[in-house]
Image: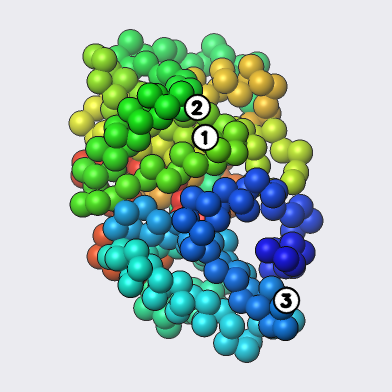
Amino acid sequence: MNNPGIDKLCFKVNAKRTTEGIRGYIEKSNYSSIVYEVNNRVVGFNFIHSCGSFAWFGPFGVHPEYQGKGIGKAIINHTIKILKEDYKVSTIGLNTMPESQYNVGFYMNLGFTPLKLSLNLKKQLDSSDRPQLTSSKKYSVNEIDISDEKNNLILKENLKSISNEMFNNFDLTSEFHLVRHETFGTILELKACEKIHGIVICHTKSIREDSLKDLKIKLAIIDNSIDYKEAIDSIIEFCVKYAQNIKYESISIDCNTYNTEICNHLMLKHKFKIEKTQVMMIMGEFNPFKNKNTILLTRLAG
């Protein structure tokens, strides 16, 4: 974007987005993200995230000086057109702030349906975390180096396989991009009896230029045929140790309230607390968080 300050103004934050974060978003969307210009000045933007037959978008913003002029509506309508006509997606999702009546109404008027809440959960780390956690003998969690092409291809195939159980042609492999090409973090695999039952994407970098030492579990997808509580316990235990080893102060994860039992498990057993809530909105029939075959922990927001 040739107007980097626009994002700070739209979201009322002090820290701007990192160059590698913006570049990663653009590249992983096959350069289909959108800007709106007036007199060669960027006054609006939207980042597209394509996952096969499902897509989501965000962050999306319009410069405060240009709000109320129909620019936001034009950007979202163009986004929908690209996703449906060029990417052939059947469902489009997003997250927005539930306390903003304007935002929810804006998206409803464009054809989106509000669903349940997405909870951003955070756990502060201290020395007491180590003895409280016990290793599961059923599940192992291992860090995978996806800079190795063989490992990358194997993990991609496994992620495609697990995500495709949720919905035909649902493909989350673009979420590897920031880790593989922008060194944003690491990838974990969850295994039982030598079979992969889950994949976790962790970000050690913030998308913004801040000094937060937070290990962000950006995405966790787990085969629902296993004991999900023990599987989550194994993932959190690994992430606690990983975060402490790199001197980080907290772990965060997003959980949709379609998975109320998981949200409660994370808060009651692992002492996560709610930092922020967002409402999920969908245009289409597929809800990735309401599925009997697979558990998905992430949020549809940049």
SS for dot 3: strand
Amino acid of disc 1: Arg
Up-down relation of residue 169 to residue 99 (above or below): above
- What is the spatial separation of the Cα atoms under label 2 and label 1, in whole angstroms? 6 Å
Between 223 and 161, the one lying in front of the other is 161
**Residue 204 in the figure: left or right of residue 188:** right
**Residue 262 in the figure: left or right of residue 29:** left
Q: Position of residue 59 (x, y in %)?
A: 57, 61
Amino acid of disc 2: Ser
Q: Which residue is mark 2?
A: 147
Between 265 and 279, the one lying in front of the other is 279
Quick one: label 3 or label 1, which is nearer the N terminus? Answer: 3
- Residue at 33% of width from left, 10% of height from top? 137
**Residue 213 in the figure: left or right of residue 287:** right
Q: Position of residue 18 (x, y in %)?
A: 70, 48
Up-down relation of residue 45 to residue 126 (above or below): below
Between 129 and 240, the one lying in front of the other is 240
